Amino acid sequence: MQRKWVAMKTNEILRWIPAVEQMATQVKTQERGVRLHHDVIVKLLRASVADFRQQLLWGNNNDSFSQEAAVHAWIRNRFAQKADELTGKSLKKTVNATGVVLHTNLGRAPICERARELVLSVMEGYSTLEYDADSGGRGERYSHVEQRLTELTGAEAALAVNNNAAAVMLALGGVARGREVLVSRGELVEIGGSFRIPDVIKQSGAVLVEVGATNKTHLQDYTAAITPATAAILKVHTSNFSMVGFTGQPEMSELCRLARENNLVSINDVGSGTLLALTVAGTAEPTVQECIAAGFDLVTFSGDKLLGSGQAGLIAGKKTIMDKLKKEPLLRALRIDKMSLAALEGTLIEYATGQAELTIPVWHMLQAPPERLQEKAAELAANLQALGGFGWQVRVIKTKSLAGGGSLPGVELDGYGIEIETVGISAGDVAKQLRTSVTPVVCLVREAALIFDVRCLLPGDEAILTKLLLGIASGEST
C-alpha cells in the first residue's frame, strides 16, 4: 500500500510540471531569458524538467514538492543554474598565491605589458599576419619573429608553432619520418598531462631507438646504435625531474660531433628553454644559445615557460633543415595563431632591447630578492589587520616555492608569505570560497592554516585578496 501511495503521489507531482513553451514565455521576460535565444531557453528548460523527473525517480525531496508552486520553483532554479553556467565565464583571471611561478594549471607565464598591448591591437581588427606590406602580396606568419629569434639565439633560422610538443613532432617528422631516432633511456620523460616523449616520437612517424641505461648513457652507446636506418640523435632536457647519484650523459658538443661524423641530424629538446642565464641554488637551466653554440642542428623549446610569453613551441637551427620543415604538410596543423604570435613578438622585443629581466613577470618572480618578498608579505599582513577583529590570526612566515613548468626540478625558492588561522570557519572552507569567487584566488592549506605566498602576486592582487578575505571573515558574500 505504501509503494502504491508513493506512485500515486509521484504521478500527481508530475502533472504539476508546466508545458515547456509556457515556461519559456515566462522566462523570456526575466533577466536570464532576455540574454538567451529562444531555442536555447527551450533546450535548457527541457533539461531542467528531465533533472526534476530524475529527482522524483530517485525519491529525492518528494516531501518538498507538496505544492505545485514548489515544483515550478525547483525547475526555474535549475534553469537559472544552467543558464548561468552557459553564459558565465569559465576562464577567469586568477590570483596565484601558491608561490609556483610557472603554474601549469594557472596558465604558466603571465605576459608582459608590451605583449599584452600587441595582442590587444591584433584582436581589435585585421592584421599583417600573412601580408607583406612592402610588396602588397602574401607574407609569411613566421617572419614576425624569425629574425629576432635568430639574432637572440645565434641560429640561422627559426620557426614558431603552437607548443613545444608540436615543435618536437614537426622536427622529427621532417628529418626522421620512417627512420630511427636515438634517445637516451634516461631522457624518455613524461612532459605533463601523460604526454611522453616516446608517444611524440611515434606520432611524428619516426622510430624510437633507446640507448644506454636509465642512469648512465655513454657516447659509445649512441655510436653502437647507429645503423643505415638512423636519421637523428635526440637529446631531451630532463627539466621536470632530477636524477642524482651514479649518473651521466655525454657532453652536448660530443653528441653533435658524433651526429656530424655520421651524417645525422642532432636535435635538442631543451624544454622550458631560456634565453637568459638562470642559476638557482647551484642548479642551472641550459640556455638556447648554449645549445646552438654546442652545434645542435635543431633546438626546440617552449614559449610560455622561462621565455615568459604565451603558448608557443619554437625551433631554432640550421636554415637548410628549417626550410624543409616549413614545407611539411604537418606545419599547417601545428602553426601558431595570430594572438600567440603577437604575444611572442612583444616578448622577444623586450629581450632584443635588453629589458626582459625588468619587464617580463616571470623574471621578476624568479629573481625577487628575499628582503623584497618579506616587505611585500608585511604590507599584505598590515592590510589584513582587520581580520584580528574576527579572531583570525595573521603572521608573516618564510616560504619555499618552486619555479614550476618543468624548470629547475627539485630547486626550492626561498621566499615569504602570510599564514592565516581562521575562527568560526575551517581553512579548507575559506580556500574553497576563495577559489570559487568571481576572481579566484588559489592558495595553500597547511595544518589547518591558509598560506599565501607573495612571490607571484601581481599589481592589484593584494587588493583583491584583502577584499575577499575580509568579506569571508565578516560573513558577507564574495
Image (cartoon, rainbow, N blue to C red):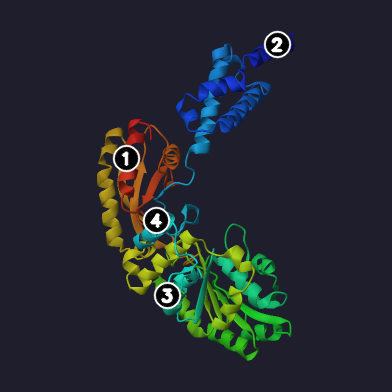
Instruction: Report the residue at 31% width, 66% height from top.
Output: 358
Residue at image position (28%, 56%) is: 374
User: Circle 3 is placed at which residue position?
Assistant: 148
Answer whether residue 81 is visible to the viewer in this image: yes
Q: Is residue 448 above or below residue 199?
A: above
How far apart marks 3 and 1 lie (CA) works out to: 43 Å
Q: Amino acid at mark 3?
A: Arg
Q: Does residue 409 appear to the left or right of 348 in the view shown?
A: right
List the residue tagged with mark 4: 120
How far is mark 2 from mark 1, CA to CA? Answer: 52 Å
Q: Where residue 155 sits in the image (x, y, percent)?
A: 48, 81
**First in residue order: circle 2 vs circle 4:** 2
Q: Residues within 10 Å of mark 2 (few under 14, many from 20)?
A: few
Where residue 467 is drawn, which disc sits there?
1
Q: Amino acid at mark 1?
A: Lys
In terms of secondary structure, where does tag 4 sit?
Answer: helix
* Element under disc 1: helix
Task: State the residue position of label 2.
Answer: 8
Q: Position of residue 423 (x, y in %)?
A: 36, 34
Assign the N terminus to one quadrant of the image.
Answer: top right
Q: Amino acid at mark 4?
A: Leu
CA separation, marks 4 and 3?
21 Å
Query: Of tags 2 and 4, which is closer to the observer?
Result: 4
Instruction: Tell me the element at label 2.
Output: helix
Q: Judge whether 448 appears above or below 50 on screen.
A: below
Label 3 close to label 2 by CB (< 8 Å): no
* CA distance separating discs 2 and 4: 61 Å
For the residues labelled 4 and 1, the Cα–Cα distance comes to 29 Å
Could you say where residue 327 lies in the image, as x and y percent from the top left? Answer: 61, 74
N-terminal of the pair, mark 3 or mark 1, is: 3
